Image (cartoon, rainbow, N blue to C red):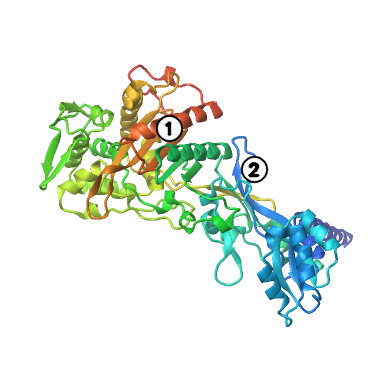
Amino acid sequence: MRAQFRTRIRVVLGLVVFAALLIVARLYFVQIVRGEDYEQKIDRQFTAASGPFDRGAIYFISKEGTFISAATLASGFLVAVNPQTLTDPEGAFSALTAVASSTVDRESFMAAARKKSQVYIEVAHRLSEAEGKTLAAKKIPGIQVLQERWRQYPGGALAAQTIGIVSYGSGDTLRGQTGLEATYDATLARSGNSLFRNFFAELFSNVGNVLVDAKEAREGDIVTTIEPQIETRLAEDLAKLSKRYSSKESGGIIMDPSTGAIIALATHPSYDANDRKNISPSLLGNPLVEHVYEFGSIMKTLTMAAGLDAGVITPESTYNDTGCITVDQRTICNHDRKARGVVPMQQVLSQSLNLGASWIATELGQEKFREYFTKLFGQKTGIDLPAETAALLGNLSSPRQVEYDNMSFGQGIAVTPIQMIRAQAALANGGTMVEPHIAERIQLDTGISRTLDWGGRVEIFKPKTAREVSVMLTSVADNSLGGGAHRIPTMTFAAKTGTAQLTDGKGGYHSDRYFHSFVGYFPSYAPRFIILLYTNDPQGVQYASETLTNTFMDLTHFLINYYAIPPDRGLVPQGGTPPDGARQ
């Protein structure tokens, strides 16, 4: 009997201790984690039913693993008028403009002052702490100075089209409208009335949040894969590129080809996310996922891979290059219209021969060509950005061979930049298409971190195929790119340029306007990074090798130094054949 009594006492004591721990944990959450929110509630003398704006943060992540704020909340003051107690509108407006003239509109202020049936109208926002305190000290009848918060982007224009913006949609709720702000709105948004519960209700309610299962939790901060120094360098290089050639648009993506983690992505022009009044609506979207382009000759790497993978050619195969051919009553030529005679497969990539790519397409046959290119581009990538566009693949249904010949060298097929880098990464990582992504994990409000699952993979090419193409592209980089001038003595890299004629909107192509692209990865046989660059309609220059090579090499050398990537040239025998055991 006494033993049973002791057991009951122990159970009761255990429950008491457990309850005490829950209270302590909840107090920590309320007073420390949400303490700033409660402080703002106390400081505000008037608040809308929804409470002060609250939203989770978005972070870049440095190579050392440090979180760098990409989207956060800024604090300051707003000014509201009570028309029923505002006795001197002119004097109040003068006092207000003396403190914060840049935030106040006279016409709106006076219109608010005349609405005598109302007691609360906001007339100015985002006053600094000094401005707010100065104005509050004046104690102007009918003027309320209240704390507020708003979305702040510390990087300004840095990755703006990727991070996105928050604004009012339908109704009166602030929501993510573009970029990651939109994709992860349900995670970043916060319940508007959560701060206005009874304290003890807040203390004891949702106790399960303390022990929450990370897989089921929603509210938290977003940690991205974007490295801010790399993002800055890419954005700067693209801006210089566009300025030099007066391009309509330039863009780039840097990705880990083995995981799909995007280290940097940018386009020029872009916008400053903090300067909402001057953002052009045309720039709010992200061209890297929303626009499709005919990429030109970088498509030849995939045509070559398809031919090798299907077994219809080998690296030793040759064809007779006549400079121009007629297919379905259409003429197809090399870029210089010159005949080369008997040509091996390496030269198809090294000299970027259109006839070589079209010959491979013919050897593949329409059914096989369609099968490979549908696997490569038939589905959206699923990247965690809104409004991703599908590729334009209508020519894959054509019975005419000329359409397949054109697609083999990147004309007549239009894909997004994110689709293109995903497909090209399959050559770098051993034949697999990975899931490109920007968010890496969610930091929950409870302190728990939930890593996002981006494990989806699609096998496209055999490892042997990917290795063979990597050997060929390394030879392009070592011997053909700039006549071998860009060869890195200590590091192998694979590279291919692309030049496509721009469509004229009438079913044909401009003879003097081009879309330039460049893709490359390094080290060639165990790649850390793959880079895709493009510039749209550059002026005064014809070939991508002239516009994009220096930008690619600049980024490559920067990444090698920044990440201290060890040399691999000594591991690769002369001639570019990868060593045994090179990662597939």
Q: Position of residue 276 (x, y in %)?
A: 58, 57
Q: Position of residue 385 (x, y in %)?
A: 48, 54
* Quadrant containing the N terminus in the rendered view: bottom right
Camera-side residue: 21 or 99? 99
Camera-side residue: 86 or 369? 86
Q: SS of the residue at dot 1?
A: helix
Residue at the image point whose x is 32% and y is 22% from the top: 483
Q: How many marks?
A: 2
Disc 1 marks which residue? Answer: 552
Q: Position of residue 546 (x, y in %)?
A: 35, 32
Q: Position of residue 383 (x, y in %)?
A: 46, 51
- Marks 2 and 1, the one that precedes in the sequence: 2
Horizontally, residue 324 falls left or right of residue 124, namely: left
> Hey, what amino acid is under mark 1?
Phe
Camera-side residue: 132 or 365? 132
Inter-mark Cα distance, 2 to 1: 27 Å
Q: SS of the residue at dot 2?
A: strand
Q: Can the viewer see residue 49?
A: no
Camera-side residue: 482 or 100? 100
* Quadrant containing the C terminus in the rendered view: top left
Horizontally, residue 505 falls left or right of residue 66, namely: left
